[in-house]
């Protein structure tokens, strides 16, 4: 396992993203919508990097199953608890890969008429895009490697690693 992005690099970048988001939003709370489960660690740190009021909600989407490559199929496995009509929604995602998950989710959320709808993703693999997604705030662009840690999993393992690591040598 090779460290790609260290814990301290992650924390520095999350603070920078927080400062930028604080500066770019109008008055009022930001509704952080985290995509389960990978984005939970990022959500927890980002929410505390923000100085303005936030609300937190979760949405469950599945498109990957146990494999490393997208199945192309997306389904909602857990919906939001709150209405997002007329509020500023910031979708918090761990990594944007093919874009299939977020492309689907953005269509679902747009129909609920939020005031604004943006995406913050800690990691972005722009070289792998199959569906267009606008990522307003991106932490790190990474090459086409499979990463685990800081919430990211391989078959539900490794989520609690403090660094983001490249998983090598497994099928
Ligand atoms: P997309 O729909 O292909 O953009 O996939 C997004 C989801 O796939 C992410 O939320 C992750 O759960 C998962 N994913 C994509 N790349 C990786 C990776 O390198 N490691 C772990 N999970 C990944
Ligand atoms: Mg996953």
Image (cartoon, helix red, strand yellow):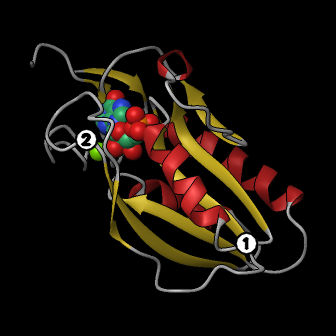
Mark number, residue 64:
2
Q: Is residue 20 above or below residue 32?
A: above
Q: Where is residue 65 in the image (x, y as percent from the top left)?
A: 18, 44
On the picture, is 67 further left or further right than 25? left
Q: Name the residue at 44% across, 45% down.
A: 101
Q: Are marks 1 and 2 in contact (CB under 8 Å)?
A: no
* Front in this rendered view, residue 19 or 116: 116
Cα–Cα gap, marks 1 and 2: 27 Å
Q: Mark 1 points at which residue?
A: 114
Query: Residue 167 occupies which quadrant of the picture?
Result: top left
Query: Mark 2 near ligand 1 (CB under 8 Å)?
Result: yes
- Residue lying furthest bottom: 82
Query: Residue 112 occupies which quadrant of the picture?
Result: bottom right
Element at label 1: loop
Q: Name the residue at 68% across, 39% down.
A: 134
Q: Is residue 1 above or below residue 19?
A: above
Element at label 2: loop
Specify whether residue 164 is in view: no
Q: The N terminus is located in which quarter?
A: top left
Q: Name the residue at 19% across, 42% down.
A: 158
Q: The C terminus is located in which quarter?
A: top left
């Amino acid at each position: 396992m090779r460290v790609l992005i260290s814990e301290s690099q992650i924390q520095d970048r999350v603070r920078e993203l927080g400062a930028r988001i604080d500066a770019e939003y109008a008055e009022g709370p930001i509704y952080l919508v985290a995509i389960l489960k990978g984005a939970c660690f990022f959500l927890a740190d980002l929410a505390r990097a923000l100085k303005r009021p936030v609300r937190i909600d979760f949405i469950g989407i599945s498109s990957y199953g146990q494999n490393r490559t997208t199945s192309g199929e997306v389904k909602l496995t857990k919906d939001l608890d709150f209405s997002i009509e007329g509020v500023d929604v910031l979708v918090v995602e761990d990594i944007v890969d093919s874009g299939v998950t977020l492309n689907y989710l953005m269509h679902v959320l747009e129909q609920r008429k939020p005031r604004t709808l943006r995406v913050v993703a800690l990691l972005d693999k722009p070289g792998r895009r199959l569906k267009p997604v606008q990522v307003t705030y991106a932490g790190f662009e990474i090459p086409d490697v499979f990463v685990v840690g800081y919430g990211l999993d391989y078959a539900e393992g490794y989520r609690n690693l403090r660094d983001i690591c490249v998983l090598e040598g497994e099928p």
